Image (cartoon, grey):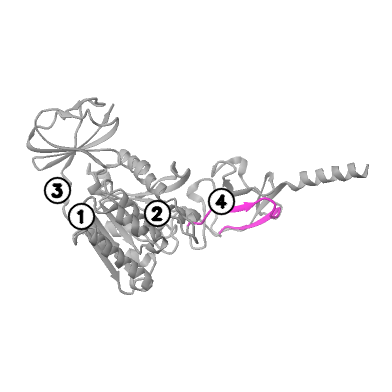
Amino acid sequence: MKKIIAFNLMIISIIFSVSAQVTFMIDSLPDYTPPDDILYIAGDFQGWNPGDPAYALQKNAQDQWYIQLDSMAAGTQIEFKFTRGDWGTVEKGVYGEEIPNREFTYGNGDTVGIIIYNWADAGGGGNSTAAENVHIIDEEFYIPQLDKHRRIWIYLPPDYETTSHHYPVIYMHDGQNLFDTYTAFAGEWEVDETLNELYDDSYAVPIVVGIDNGGVDRIDEYTPWPNSQYGGGDGDLYIQFIVGTLKPFIDENYRTLPDRENTALWGSSLGGLISHYGAMKHQDVFSKAGIYSPSYWFSDSVWTFTEQMGHQQTMRLYQMTGSLEGSGMVTDTWTMHDQLTELGFGEEELLTTIITGGEHNEASWAADFRDAYLWLFQSWANGVGDHYAIQQVQISPNPARNQIRIPEIEFNQSSLIRIYDQVGREQFENYVAGNEAIDVSKLDNGIYFIIIINNNNIYNGKFIKE
């Protein structure tokens, strides 16, 4: 009988030990938090809905916000953040910077105190330093290659809304740090201010797409190869996202010049490493890269990889490292310069700069951005007239099967046609005369962009091949 009782007590003990509850108690809020706003918890346990009424916090008798979550098995780990109802009001760090998802493992206490230091809108948005022509495309843009979501920013040139012009595109990493001090980790690059000033100085400026880093996932996503100490290795999937998902979306929804000549990558530190990797691997998609303070030290595989990729097409690569970043960083930057030179990259394709007194920080990268942009996009930035003559044309038939025509253009012997796929890879180039049809029968099914150079005019169009 005693054995049966003991067994039953053991079963009861196990039942109670494998499930647990947790209450999150807000110990401190920013003093500018609107008094009438409701606080919410959003996490992987409820689909990351930032304003789900079922996960709204309540106030106790001491006027303190709290929420008790349902029981879960001991050892279950959850990720979460607090909001005031949408991702535009998500919590931020001490300096207004992006913070990683909070984590909690059930069984590690039943009441957890929480300090919220800042909100993304800084209590109303008045403190944002982003220019008016910077926008958030999506707070939760899906990355199918990594099964994650990420905030995507876009900078549109000052004349984007008042013209029909088409623009080059720079894809930049660490989006939190590019435009807005209140989302930056340690100061912003001031990309928007710099480009707006260049525009005011009569230079042509591009579209810039900023991709937020993944916080705790940043190392994984910005490194193509693993490091025995730091992990990593998902960089190729991240680049596949830019090439295969994000770039087609941007080209479909904004007036871009989708070809490789007008497409660039740019980043710093590990972002510099992944920019080098992406540009070298996809030379058919990117022709330019801004490579700031590159972390070539992360893996010796970078040297073998660079050798294997070689010099496939004309490129423009800008490397920059600060002299105070350490002798190893400077040496690696020059070693990569020498390797690229040996692979056939000429002086007009490769510029390496060591900034005297430069450090490994946003201030150094921001200070150099203007000069680097003007070198990388020299022909575009200085050739406003040539590029602004772009006119939209209609393709017929559309969708097309075997042939297309452009009825509104009278071609001559020097009319050049180029056709690009969704990621900017050239699929067709030929000269067309008269009103002859263009053979597209060999193209795979999909969306294509066409650029026509005719009588010193540039025309742009889009069609579907089926």
**Residue at left 12%, top 41%?**
457
Kindly identify which residue carries mark 4: 81
Residue 131 visible, this angle: no
> Residue 273 at x, y = what percent?
37, 58
Within 10 Å of the Cα at label 4, are there few (<14), some (14-19), or many (20+) other Cα atoms? many
Q: Are marks 4 and 3 in contact (CB under 8 Å)?
A: no
> Residue 152 at x, y = what percent?
40, 48
Q: Earlier in the sequence, mark 1 or mark 4?
A: 4
**Quadrant where the image shows the C terminus:** top left
Within 10 Å of the Cα at label 1, are there few (<14), some (14-19), or many (20+) other Cα atoms? some
Kindly identify which residue carries mark 3: 386
The Cα–Cα distance between marks 3 and 2, rounded to whole angstroms, is 31 Å
Kindly identify which residue carries mark 2: 175
Q: Earlier in the sequence, mark 3 or mark 1?
A: 1
Kindly identify which residue carries mark 1: 381
| Displayed quadrant of residue 71 | top right
Disc 3, SS = helix
Span of residues in magenta: 98-116
Task: Answer whether residue 367 is magenta in the image.
Answer: no
Camera-side residue of 102 and 96: 102
The Cα–Cα distance between marks 2 and 4, rounded to whole angstroms, is 19 Å
Please, what is the three-letter code of the amino acid marked with disc 1? Ala
> Residue 257 at x, y = what percent?
24, 44
Please, what is the three-letter code of the amino acid marked with disc 4? Lys
The Cα–Cα distance between marks 2 and 1, rounded to whole angstroms, is 23 Å
The Cα–Cα distance between marks 4 and 3, rounded to whole angstroms, is 49 Å
The Cα–Cα distance between marks 1 and 4, rounded to whole angstroms, is 42 Å
**Quadrant where the image shows the N terminus:** top right
**Residue at left 16%, top 53%?**
383
| Displayed quadrant of residue 336 | bottom left
